[in-house]
């Protein structure tokens, strides 16, 4: 996963004062759930990439930086109980994607906020290889642990030399 942030966006982020607000867009998907959960950390709804991202006050504790695989805590309000109840029933974890998008791509005078004419909003950073595990839900809130792929679980070496696979090696 590349962490390259465009130099213009980086300069804007590093300014001591800026008029640009950076939006965190969240998409939660699962093959067994038809509805996609879309959230934006703002006080207005946004239309981005053909989907409406709904205002939300979600919590995100940043990824850990230890010897263990990266993990973070993620929680959001349980506003769409039907989708969230289906999340609780799935066996394998749903996928979570975070995108950071500058607000200056959007017309901030309309509701829901849409892209300005002639502008295609693009994310300056995307984290798309995350899974939501250890999901806990109640009538008000959904919380879980964000994890990336754990490469320690992969078998290594990928292929083993066995007699059925390479019989000529075992002949004398």
Image (tube, rainbow, N blue to C red):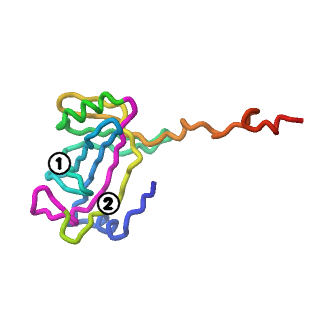
- Disc 2 crowd rating (10 Å Cα; few below 14, some 14-19, many 20+) is some
Describe the element under mark 2 as helix, strand or loop.
Answer: loop
In what element is the residue under mark 1?
A: strand
| Alpha carbon separation for disc pair 2 and 1 | 18 Å
* Quadrant of the snapshot with the N terminus: bottom left
Relative to 100, say whether 74 is above or below.
above
**Camera-side residue: 106 or 86?**
86
Residue 19 in the image: above or below residue 112: below
Image position, residue 63 (x, y; %): 39, 44
Q: Residue furthest right?
A: 172
Please tell me the numbered disc located at residue 55: 1
Q: Quadrant of residue 164?
A: top right
In the foreground, 150 or 48? 48
> Is residue 135 inside the magenta stretch?
no
- Check the image and report above or below for 109 versus 165: below
Residue named by callout 2:
123
- Whether the magenta-drawn stretch holds residue 111 is answered as yes
The residue that appears at 25% across and 59% down in the rendered structure is: 22
- Which quadrant of the figure contains the C terminus? top right
Q: What span is in magenta?
A: 91-114
Whether label 2 touches label 1, CB < 8 Å: no
């Amino acid at each position: 996963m590349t962490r390259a942030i465009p130099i213009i966006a980086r300069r804007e982020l590093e300014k001591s004062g800026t008029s640009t607000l950076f939006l965190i867009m969240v998409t939660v998907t699962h093959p067994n759930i038809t509805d996609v959960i879309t959230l934006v950390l703002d006080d207005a709804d946004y239309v981005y990439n053909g989907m409406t991202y709904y205002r939300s006050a979600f919590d995100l504790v940043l990824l850990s930086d230890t010897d263990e695989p990266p993990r973070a805590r993620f929680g959001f309000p349980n506003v769409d109980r039907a989708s969230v109840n289906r999340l609780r029933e799935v066996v394998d974890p749903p996928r979570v994607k975070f995108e950071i998008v500058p607000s200056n791509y959007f017309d901030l005078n309309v509701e829901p906020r849409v892209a300005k004419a002639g502008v295609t909003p693009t994310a300056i950073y995307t984290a798309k290889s995350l899974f939501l595990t250890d999901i806990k839900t109640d009538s008000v809130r959904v919380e879980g642990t964000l994890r990336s792929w754990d490469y320690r679980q992969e078998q290594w070496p990928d292929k083993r030399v066995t007699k059925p696979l390479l019989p000529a090696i075992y002949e004398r």
